[in-house]
Image (cartoon, grey):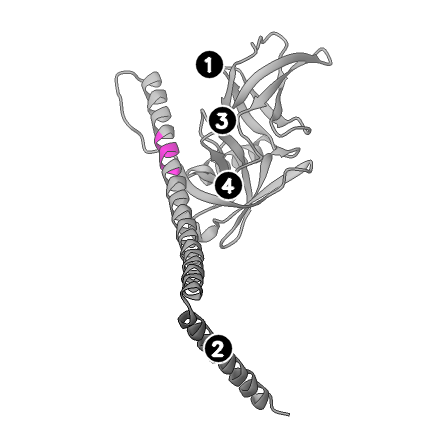
């Protein structure tokens, strides 16, 4: 049986209902001053609700545009900061020549689509992928510090491990010293990590700033990670230094993906040397 008669009946009934409602309101509006006042007030409330909803929608999209703009500005500022750090290193190596090198790193703003925080292998998914120039083994940072590392990429999304993942290690440097060590998540908290493989003769004071060392092909040097806290000896052979992370993993919405432009060349050279060593 065709649905067309039913559809026509529904449309006709709806039209009759609307006509009757309009007629009733018109009669009510003209019947008395009291009814007229009530009608006007109801109309004003309805208009206010509609206009308020429309304004909320406009504000929502305006705020989203503003947040996207701030994310892009953060990425630009992080890139500028990395270039200044490279300039400082160039001055330290050869004070007779001061140049402003092009950064080896490219910065891409991204938004967090999903992030886990309650497992021992926490991950993050970002809204940028191959179409945006993102590649695997890129760093993930914010203005507060290191977030994680991209491990897989498809056309429009990137998947990565956060610092709150037992499988992730970051090469870190303590204070202004030459001491470098691998940094691991403590496996317990949102803001705890530790430095390992430190020889016992090294003294690490509480409150020293821990930053990326720049010795890997993933992160530039000097990205903040956290502050040192307590120190203890492990098995009489190495020192463990606990670190309070700067990054707040409970409220990350915008991040910056940082890619080493020379990464493939560096890793190819390292792999070739490893093959020779075997």
Residue 109 place in picture, x, y as percent? 43, 42
According to the image, label 1 marks what residue?
176
According to the image, label 2 marks what residue?
18
Q: Nearer the viewer, mark 4 or mark 2?
A: 2
Identify the mark at residue 120; answer none if there is no mark.
none
- Left or right, 38 with respect to 84, comes to right
Residue 185 place in picture, x, y as percent? 63, 28
Q: Nearer the viewer, residue 15 or 207?
A: 15
Q: Nearer the viewer, mark 3 or mark 4?
A: 4
Q: Residue at left 48%, top 45%? A: 111
Q: Are marks 4 and 2 in contact (CB under 8 Å)?
A: no
Give the quadrant of the C terminus.
Answer: top right
Cα distance in 3D space between marks 4 and 1:
31 Å
Q: How many numbered markers are drawn?
A: 4
According to the image, label 4 marks what residue?
253
Cα distance in 3D space between marks 4 and 2:
46 Å
- Left or right, 6 with respect to 64, comes to right
Q: Residue at left 41%, top 59%? A: 44
Identify the mark at residue 215; answer none if there is no mark.
3
- Where 205 sits versus 192, above or below? above
């Amino acid at each position: 049986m065709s649905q067309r008669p039913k559809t026509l009946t529904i449309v006709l009934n709806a039209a009759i209902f609307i006509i009757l409602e309009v007629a009733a309101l018109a009669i009510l509006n003209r019947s008395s001053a009291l009814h007229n006042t009530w009608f006007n007030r109801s109309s004003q409330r309805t208009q206010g609700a509609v206009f308020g909803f429309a304004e909320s929608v406009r504000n929502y999209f305006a705020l989203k545009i503003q947040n996207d703009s701030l994310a892009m500005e953060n990425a630009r500022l992080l890139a500028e900061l990395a270039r200044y750090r490279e300039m400082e290193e160039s001055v330290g190596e050869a004070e007779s020549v001061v140049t402003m090198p092009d950064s080896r790193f490219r910065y891409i703003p991204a938004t967090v689509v999903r992030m886990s925080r309650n497992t021992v292998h926490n991950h993050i998914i970002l809204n940028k992928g191959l179409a945006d120039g993102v590649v695997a083994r890129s760093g993930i940072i914010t203005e507060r510090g290191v977030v994680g590392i991209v491990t897989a990429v498809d056309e429009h999304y990137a998947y990565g491990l956060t610092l709150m993942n037992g499988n992730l290690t970051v090469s870190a440097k303590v204070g202004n010293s030459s001491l470098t060590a691998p940094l691991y998540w403590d496996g317990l908290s949102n803001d705890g990590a530790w430095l390992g493989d430190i020889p016992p003769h090294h003294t690490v004071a509480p409150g020293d700033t821990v930053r990326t060392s720049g010795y890997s092909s993933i992160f530039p040097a000097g990205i903040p990670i956290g502050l040192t806290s307590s120190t203890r000896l492990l098995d009489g052979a190495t020192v463990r230094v606990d670190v309070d992370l700067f990054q707040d993993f409970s409220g990350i919405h915008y991040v910056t993906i940082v890619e080493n432009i020379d990464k493939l060349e560096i890793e190819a050279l390292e792999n070739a040397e490893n093959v020779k060593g075997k």
